[in-house]
Amino acid sequence: MSAPRIQKAPDGKPWPRPRVLVSRREQRPYAFGWKPLLQPEEGARIPIHLHEALPHSLVVRELGGPYHVDWTPTDAPLLTADYTLSHPQNGTAMEALVLVEAKRNDLAASLTHGHDALMAEMERMRVAKHRYLVAAASGDDLMEGRCGCASRVKAMVHCLESIAMRCGVQVRQYASQSRAEYVIALVLQRAWREHLTECAESLACERAREARAA
């Protein structure tokens, strides 16, 4: 992803923090610098966090978080993946710009028993310019069977290769959830800054929000 790495936005001011939308299907969403709340298994979603920032979070320490985070609107659910951005001008999901699918301890199951469903989701993610699968499970964990399904390691590796080569989805694996959250936050930040660089109207909307909140 080619994204601006300078510390200032095009108007010379600090970058506005990204506005992240989370799929309502997600049971354990990352909170991107906030203390998360445990979500119910089924039913209506409760708030993702209680506005209690985590100073030790990599998103706060390294990326200027915490981010703005909320569920996708009930009348406009995210059709695929787990994370995207909220459009600064109207709050709609920016699925054409960026989509991120997150996996935790369910990676092995998704690559084996859930193979067909996972591949269908990866195909649907083609609508996005930037698309990622980020797993909180390292390549060593997968190869050594620590993610489960040890007898099917070769099939799991081939599935990951297909996701990258056939669907054009960037696959990233990390040994910890905090590192996976950081990488998802970084991907979303770069896409956010890319959009604000290309769209002056969106940057103006964010500045207007900042002024109202001041």
Image: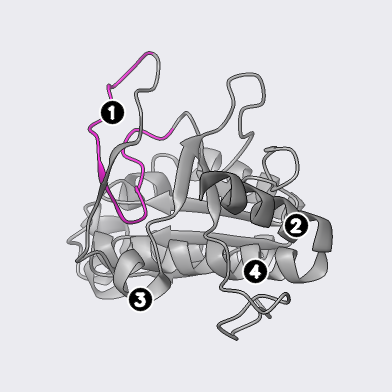
Of label 3 and label 1, which has the lower sequence position?
Answer: 1
* Element assignment for label 1: loop
* Element assignment for label 4: helix
Q: Could you say which disc has been placed on residue 39 in the image?
A: 1
- The CA distance from mark 4 to mark 2 is 13 Å
Q: Residues within 10 Å of mark 3 (few under 14, many from 20)?
A: few
Q: Amino acid at mark 1?
A: Gln
- The CA distance from mark 3 to mark 1 is 26 Å
Measured as percent of width and height from the top left, residue 64 is found at 41, 69
Of label 1 and label 4, which has the lower sequence position?
Answer: 1
Query: Which residue is denoted by mark 2 in the rendering?
Result: 204
Which one is in front in this view, the residue at disc 4 or the one at disc 2? 2
Magenta span? 26-43
Look at the image and say whether residue 81 sits in the magenta stretch.
Answer: no
Q: Amino acid at mark 3?
A: Glu
Where is the N terminus found, in terms of image quarters? bottom right
- The CA distance from mark 1 to mark 2 is 34 Å
State left or right for residue 38 relative to residue 164. left
Query: Which residue is denoted by mark 3 in the rendering?
Result: 62
Look at the image and say whether residue 38 sits in the magenta stretch.
Answer: yes
Res. 95 visible in picture: yes
Residue found 67% across the figure and 38% down from its top: 91
Query: Which residue is denoted by mark 4 in the rendering?
Result: 193
Of label 3 and label 4, which has the lower sequence position?
Answer: 3
